[in-house]
Amino acid sequence: MLSPDGKKRVIITNVSPKVEEGRFPAKAIVEDDIVISADIFGDGHDVIAASAYIRHAADRLWRELPMRFVTNDRWQTAFSAERKGTYTFKVTAWVDHYTTWKNGLKKKYEAGQDIGVDLLIGAGLLRDAASANQREAVRLNTWAAQLEESTDPGQAVFLAHDPEVAAVMYKHRYRDAVTEYPTTYRIEVERKKAGFSTWYELFPRSASPEAERHGTFNDVANLLPHIAKMGFDVLYFPPIHPIGEVNRKGKNNSLKANPGDPGSPWAIGNRLGGHKAIHPELGTFDDFKALIKAAGDYGIEIAMDIAYQCAPDHPYVKEHPQWFTWRPDGTVQFAENPPKKYEDILPFNFETDDWENLWKELKSVIDYWVGAGIKVFRIDNPHTKAFAFWQWMIGEVRAEHPEVIFLAEAFTRPRVMERLAKAGFNQSYTYFTWRNTKQEIEQYMTELVHTEMRHYFRPNFWPNTPDILPPILTHGGENAHIMRVILAGTLSSNYGLYGPVYEFGMNTPHGSKEEYIDNEKYEIKHWNWDQYTRIGDIITRLNRIRRENTALQSTWNIQFADTSNDQILCYIKTDANTGNQLAIVVNLDVFHTQGAHIRLPMDKLGIGYDEHYIVSDLLGGGKYRWFGDFNYVELNPYLMPAHIFTIIKEQNHD
Amino acid sequence: MLSPDGKKRVIITNVSPKVEEGRFPAKAIVEDDIVISADIFGDGHDVIAASAYIRHAADRLWRELPMRFVTNDRWQTAFSAERKGTYTFKVTAWVDHYTTWKNGLKKKYEAGQDIGVDLLIGAGLLRDAASANQREAVRLNTWAAQLEESTDPGQAVFLAHDPEVAAVMYKHRYRDAVTEYPTTYRIEVERKKAGFSTWYELFPRSASPEAERHGTFNDVANLLPHIAKMGFDVLYFPPIHPIGEVNRKGKNNSLKANPGDPGSPWAIGNRLGGHKAIHPELGTFDDFKALIKAAGDYGIEIAMDIAYQCAPDHPYVKEHPQWFTWRPDGTVQFAENPPKKYEDILPFNFETDDWENLWKELKSVIDYWVGAGIKVFRIDNPHTKAFAFWQWMIGEVRAEHPEVIFLAEAFTRPRVMERLAKAGFNQSYTYFTWRNTKQEIEQYMTELVHTEMRHYFRPNFWPNTPDILPPILTHGGENAHIMRVILAGTLSSNYGLYGPVYEFGMNTPHGSKEEYIDNEKYEIKHWNWDQYTRIGDIITRLNRIRRENTALQSTWNIQFADTSNDQILCYIKTDANTGNQLAIVVNLDVFHTQGAHIRLPMDKLGIGYDEHYIVSDLLGGGKYRWFGDFNYVELNPYLMPAHIFTIIKEQNHD
């Protein structure tokens, strides 16, 4: 069989951005400059032209974006994503006979060759275009006649190169000779907070100022000034639902709860309700809505934790027994990883024949809380629920509410975490928590920023969580807490902390486990929020620097710099739009002063190798005059483990 | 809309081998072990299973290949490609509930837990399978009953793990829970010569033993012993068709031919015929067929050059004027790259409305010569003809004659060369001709071998061609000719030479151009085939080593070794099937002796770091006892610029 596209001589391939050849949308943030690029080339030496077309889901018409040649057969164009939601784009290209002709004409003319016949050829191209384009026919035929009747070759070459002629001819294409790449791709444009957010996690039940009283939403409201002053803009709560009473866990994850033990908030549901109910001791639904509003006044959004699992006494178990697995002895199947048993938790059976109703009910949980004013959800263990469910659920919710953000709490294998992000999660927990050495950090950032992951996996860096006390924090104490939060907040535009524990430097592990002793998951804590801590002070400075420096509001603009000491990590972050340029230098050794020569990438900074410039430390306050790419730094972790330098070019005044 | 595949919990992605997400087939050689792999994973902790299915184009049924877990969610299987032609494959995966259950059962049993209910669960799985599988129902129900009635938990666990049970249960899958990757991929399996070939190019018209007589096919027949003795197995001729007389080029590409100038064989066609005719002075069609047969007796295949272009007096111009471009003054458009003109050549117009007939006629040229017994074609400048044409033409020819090999002579931009290979060319000329330094060679080989190119771009390394005399050969003389041919023949399993010129060390350039002076393209040469040359001697040894060492018969099995001197390049080539292991060491400095410590990758060689082994130089004849990974080598380019060591493990006899 002959190809149906025999006359389409231009090839398009390797289109970007794409995720799994278009199976999933690429992600972007509203107002981002989105670059569309592709390898585009034809056979032979003819000039080619290319255009991308974009369309927002709410639009009827495609918008054409002419592409330009960059290098090595790569073409690109860019547009500003003005609206949230889904954009679709496609790429087209064709042989540009008119430009091929006019370029050849000029070369022949300049070489002194006779161009009489060539002018007739060009006139023919214009007349062909005229007969296909009624609106421009008069102008095109006039130009054609001028070429045909020309007695001054120089003037004719000039006319051929007239931009007005070129513009009309650019629009003229023979449909059957235009290559259109067979796949259209999607870009999911999200709101600013999806790309730049600073999270503080606390257990509302520990928010009470009185040691013996259960904390409430109203108590949390009183903490908002503290959290806002520190510069956090997302306040995230573990589940706030009624806690199971059957098989409730006691302190330190013990199998038997003592009377008065509050249980784990992740054991969701009891006779008082399930995923759409509020644990009564926290307050009422109205209290919750009032807290959401009060937080909003401080520029803080409340994020909820959604854990799709049930305590044995969750109402679903009786109402929808078909959503659970039942054993031949008539008992319900609790979570297990043989020989371990988790008797306080029932998983949903995603292979139930009633899966469609299960999916709908689980989505309705999100809808319910979106209705209450929640737009940010941290999803617990998404990797133990069906991928297809997430793709459907997140897609449905975001189609209606594109402002909703889902953070995937999956600390699991790389391919699984990647797939969840592809399925729609807007942010993802990462391996940052365990990446400590210079090589580990550089390698991990390279993977996140310089592979296809960049287009779908948006990292959120957490130095700790209620589940994870990494060894560096245990062994490195206060200095480590400071160093790690500075890394989190400057490597990634999205970062978060399990807050009070971090702020107050708690770091006692549970035996040999990488977990906190006396974990707040199983008991109520009491914190002295008013005490000064060096950690809290530096977090406050860090978050202010993040707000004031746009270069820290993207994760993709990092470039590492060579240093002469493996204990000193250095990277620059730059924002071409605002001119904001930072160099971050971190001493990874939490016990000793370390020094290094660092070598900044001057080309990227736009500073000459023989120029002076000022680096001003936004964190510690020092200010230095540097020269060229090699400069020396020294950091004492007991004073300040890092510089966050803003780079200021010197005026010419010498 | 709910996903139609809600119960399919297993994800498949990143399937290999693939080329542009299945748009083009991957390439392989008959009897290759073809590895099919994919990232495969499910949610949660259930055990999963996966199978690939393959089918040759001539088969009706799919063959199932169970896949096994490798690491990091990567699964693979392999099969031997027994037949030439196109294989299709697909990948499927599912949750393996039976294995999940039996693994958990064992862990619970070993932890001393009660497994009574678990045995009933397992029996239920067996009974479900029985009701879906009539043929195995009796056995399955019997096993189920044994589990149900078991009074000995240990024995029940043993039964659950019986391989016979596992084998039956592996075949049992719930169709609606099996994920099938949506794309099926193709693998094009070619004959051995596509993967391992050694080419010698000569102009038959220069084959005459008498200086003043035009060479003939019969003269070439007399050279076969010489070419066979040197170890070449493809003898490639420039076009053998009648040469245009209109605008014929003279010596050294001069615009005017003198009387008696033979013209360029690439200016195809005159009043005596075109692409299906033979230049009469070379002999008759029967002479040609006789030569093909005689060459075959020496194990040599004749390769023809197909250049789809016409001299102005080619019969096509009168018979099919619509395939050419005509200018408004009634003249036909010759090739041009303004302001340069190539008046001896007319290109085809691939945008002609009659393109379908043009394509068919061009394909008929191949069919014609295939009919004469030619199975190897070197295609001239394919990058100046439509890509869609090549994909169609090569696909059609190979569907009928899968033994036909097309070599793409495109020395052009990377994306264009890649696309021609994707479109179907079985071998491609490369940038090797200009890659001289250690870094250049390592980088280029890495690109060819360790990117997706490996699956579609099969390199054929040429140190020279009639069009290209690279500077290294001009400046480096005999030593450079020897060094470069050793590189070509050991880096790539396919390599070739523009033979007599290379063998006899001709290297005078045409002025400042990287071309030969007095180019054979425009005049007839006379060679003294009987003279001894050092270059020819070493080529003969090289080709014998290639035939006798299977590790040199693949391009994909290369691994570079560190060396302490940038002038010394070292790489190993290994064949796991035969155990053949080579270490090639090349002095890139053609004027000076160079030495280096080299560091062999012992893990890859299967030799301990504290073991002795023998390296025996197949090229120069030396034999050494080496220890561990670090060893010293020294090479004098005037003696022998390279070692080709075979590596022999020592027997334990000390």
Image: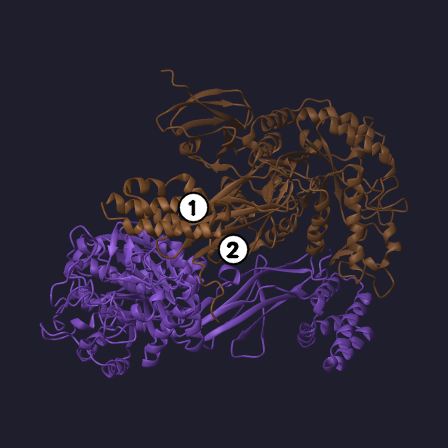
Chain colours: A purple, B brown
Where residue A6 sits: x, y (%)? 72, 60
B127 relative to B21 in the view: left or right: left
Amino acid type, callout 2: Tyr
Q: Looking at the image, which residue is at 48% across and 62% down?
A: B5
Q: Secondary structure at mark 2?
A: loop
Q: Is residue B529 visible in this depiction of the protein?
A: no
User: Chain ID for label 2?
Assistant: B
What residue is pinned by disc 1?
B140
Which residue is nearer to you in this view: B366 or A512?
A: A512
What distance separates the C-alpha of mark 2 from that of mark 1?
A: 30 Å
Please name which of the two marks, 2 or 1, marks the residue nearer to the observer: 1
User: In the image, B151: left or right of A23?
Assistant: left
Q: Quadrant of the C terminus of chain B?
A: top left
Q: Which mark is residue B181?
A: 2
Q: Quadrant of residue A142?
A: bottom right
Q: Where does the image place residue A169, in percent across and percent down from the top left? A: 70, 73
The quadrant where residue A194 appears: bottom left
> Compared to B327, does B417 lie above or below?
above
Identify the disc placed on residue A569: none
Q: Label 1 amino acid?
A: Leu
